[in-house]
Image: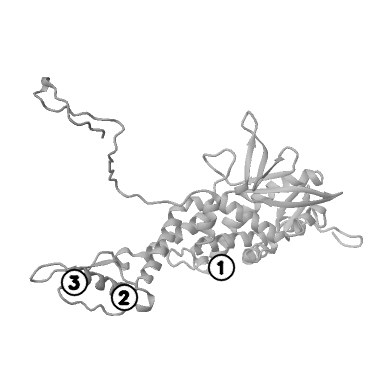
C-alpha cells in the first residue's frame, strides 16, 4: 500500500486518519475447501495409458474381447446364397501388406472398446486392388456441413492434415452408442472410470506402503517428564536414523529403538482399516461389468454367478462378443457391399466358434430328434443350404 508520510489530518473526524481500501492491493486471500477426488481425463490417450497400459483388469478385458471377436470367421452371402470365394473375403483376410485379417480386426475392436470409435479407410492400391487401413481415434475429427451432418473425416498426424470424404465411400466411422453425442461413440471404459481410478489408486498406495517398509505414516512424539525440546543436533540425528535405518523394502520389519521420552504415534490407517483388497476386487468387478466380461474369466474372486467356467464363457460369447461382431458385420456390409457388387452381406460363422460348441451340439441333437422336420428344413434351421437331389437319388 502506498502510504505517504506525514499523514494528513482531517479536522472533520477528530484528527483521525481515514482508512482507504484499494481494489488492487498486494495482500492475499486464503481459501479453505474440502478436498475432492481427482479423476482421470476422458480423452483416448489418457484412457489408453491409465487403463489398457497400466491396469491389468482393463488390459485383460480388452484383449479378451478383441481377440475373441477377431478370430471369428466371416461368411459372405449374396441374397440367401453363401459365397465361398470372393474378393471381399480376400480383402478381409488380408486388409493390407502389414496386417492379417485377425490382427486388423483386433486393433479395430480395441479402438472401439477404448474410445468408442473406429475409423477405417479404403485405399485403391491398383486396378481392382484395394486395401484397408485403420486410423487412430485421437487423430481423427468428424467434419460436418452447415446442417450438422457428418461429411468427412479430418485426419491429422503431426503437422500434416488431410480430409477423407465419407460420401465417396473412402472411409467409414464405426461408433458405439453415446446418449449425449451425435457424431462420436461412448467407450465402455469411460463408464468404469471411477472404478479404474479406485483400482489404480489402491495399487499406488500399496506400492508406496511397501517402499516405506510396509508401515503407515506416523510421528515420533517427544514428551520427557522433565519437559524441554530436542536440540537441533538431536533432531537431525533422529531424522537421519529414521531415513537411513528404517525406510525402504530391505529394512522392513526392523525394530525401532526409542529412548529419552520418544513415543511412536501412527497417523495413517492400516490396510485392514482401509480394506484395500476388497476395494480393488470391487473396482475390478465394476470394470468387468462395464466391458461385459464375467469376473470368473478374469480371475476376480466373488460374484461368480455362473456355475462353472464353461457357462461363463458361453455367456461371454453370447452377450458380449457376438453382438459386437454382428454390429461390425452390418456396418462393413453397408459400406463395402456396394463397392464389390449388389446384394452382398457379411456375417459371422457361429458353427466354427469353439466357445459355443456345446450350444451347437445341443441344437443339432434337438433338430435330429425333430421327426416332423425334413432334412432340408433341418439344414435351413442351422444355416445350411438345402441338399441338392441328384439324378437317381430318391427325394
The image position of residue 95, as x and y in percent, is: 75, 56
Q: Are marks 3 and 1 in contact (CB under 8 Å)?
A: no
- Residue 292 visible to an observer of this rendering: no
- The Cα atoms of the two marked residues, 3 and 2, are separated by 16 Å
Query: What is the residue that sits farthest to the front in this orientation?
Result: 6
- Give residue 263's mark: 3
Residue 275's image quarter?
bottom left
- Front residue of 158/94: it is 158
- Left or right position of 334 against 15: right
Q: Which of pointers 1 and 2 indicates the residue nearer the eye?
A: 2
Under circle 2, the secondary element is loop
Of the numbered discs 3 and 2, the one sitting upstream in the chain is 2
Under circle 1, the secondary element is helix
Under circle 3, the secondary element is strand
- Residue 9 visible to an observer of this rendering: yes
- Give residue 246's mark: 2
Q: Which residue is mark 1?
A: 310
Amino acid at each position: 500500500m502506498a502510504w505517504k508520510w506525514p499523514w494528513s489530518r482531517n479536522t472533520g473526524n477528530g484528527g483521525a486518519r481515514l482508512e482507504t481500501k484499494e481494489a488492487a492491493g498486494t495482500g492475499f486471500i486464503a481459501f479453505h475447501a474440502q478436498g475432492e477426488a481427482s479423476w482421470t481425463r476422458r480423452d483416448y490417450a489418457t484412457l489408453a495409458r491409465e487403463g489398457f497400459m497400466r491396469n491389468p483388469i482393463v488390459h485383460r478385458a480388452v484383449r479378451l474381447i478383441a481377440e475373441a471377436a477377431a478370430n471369428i470367421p466371416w461368411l459372405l452371402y449374396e441374397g440367401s446364397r453363401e459365397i465361398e470365394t470372393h474378393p471381399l473375403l480376400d480383402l478381409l483376410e488380408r486388409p493390407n501388406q502389414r496386417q492379417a485379417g485377425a490382427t486388423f480386426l483386433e486393433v479395430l475392436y480395441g479402438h472401439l472398446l477404448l474410445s468408442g470409435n473406429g475409423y477405417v479407410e479404403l485405399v485403391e492400391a491398383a486396378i481392382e486392388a484395394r486395401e484397408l487401413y485403420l486410423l487412430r481415434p485421437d487423430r481423427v475429427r468428424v467434419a460436418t456441413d452447415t446442417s450438422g451432418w457428418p461429411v468427412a473425416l479430418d485426419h491429422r498426424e503431426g503437422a500434416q492434415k488431410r480430409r477423407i470424404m465419407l460420401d465417396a465411400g473412402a472411409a467409414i466411422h464405426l461408433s458405439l452408442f453415446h446418449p449425449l453425442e451425435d457424431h462420436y461413440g461412448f467407450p465402455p471404459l469411460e463408464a468404469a472410470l471411477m472404478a479404474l481410478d479406485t483400482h489404480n489408486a489402491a495399487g499406488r498406495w500399496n506400492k508406496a506402503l511397501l517402499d516405506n517398509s510396509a508401515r503407515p505414516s506416523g510421528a515420533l512424539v517427544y514428551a520427557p517428564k522433565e519437559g524441554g525440546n530436542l536440540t537441533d543436533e538431536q533432531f537431525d540425528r533422529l531424522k537421519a536414523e529414521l531415513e537411513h535405518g528404517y525406510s525402504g523394502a530391505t529394512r522392513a520389519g526392523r525394530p525401532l529403538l526409542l529412548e529419552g521420552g520418544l513415543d511412536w504415534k501412527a497417523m495413517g490407517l492400516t490396510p485392514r482399516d482401509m480394506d484395500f483388497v476388497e476395494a480393488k476386487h470391487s473396482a475390478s468387478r465394476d470394470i468387468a461389468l462395464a466391458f461385459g466380461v464375467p469376473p470368473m474369466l478374469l480371475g476376480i474372486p466373488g460374484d461368480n454367478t455362473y456355475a462353472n467356467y464353461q457357462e461363463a464363457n458361453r455367456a461371454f460369447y453370447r452377450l458380449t462378443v457376438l453382438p459386437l461382431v454382428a454390429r461390425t458385420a452390418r456396418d462393413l456390409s453397408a459400406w463395402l457391399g456396394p463397392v464389390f457388387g449388389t446384394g452382398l452381406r457379411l456375417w459371422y460363422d457361429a458353427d466354427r466358434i469353439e466357445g459355443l460348441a456345446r450350444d451347437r451340439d445341443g441344437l443339432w441333437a434337438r433338430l435330429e430328434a425333430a421327426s416332423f422336420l425334413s432334412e432340408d428344413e433341418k439344414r435351413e434351421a442351422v444355416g445350411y443350404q438345402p441338399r441338392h437331389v441328384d439324378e437317381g437319388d430318391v427325394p
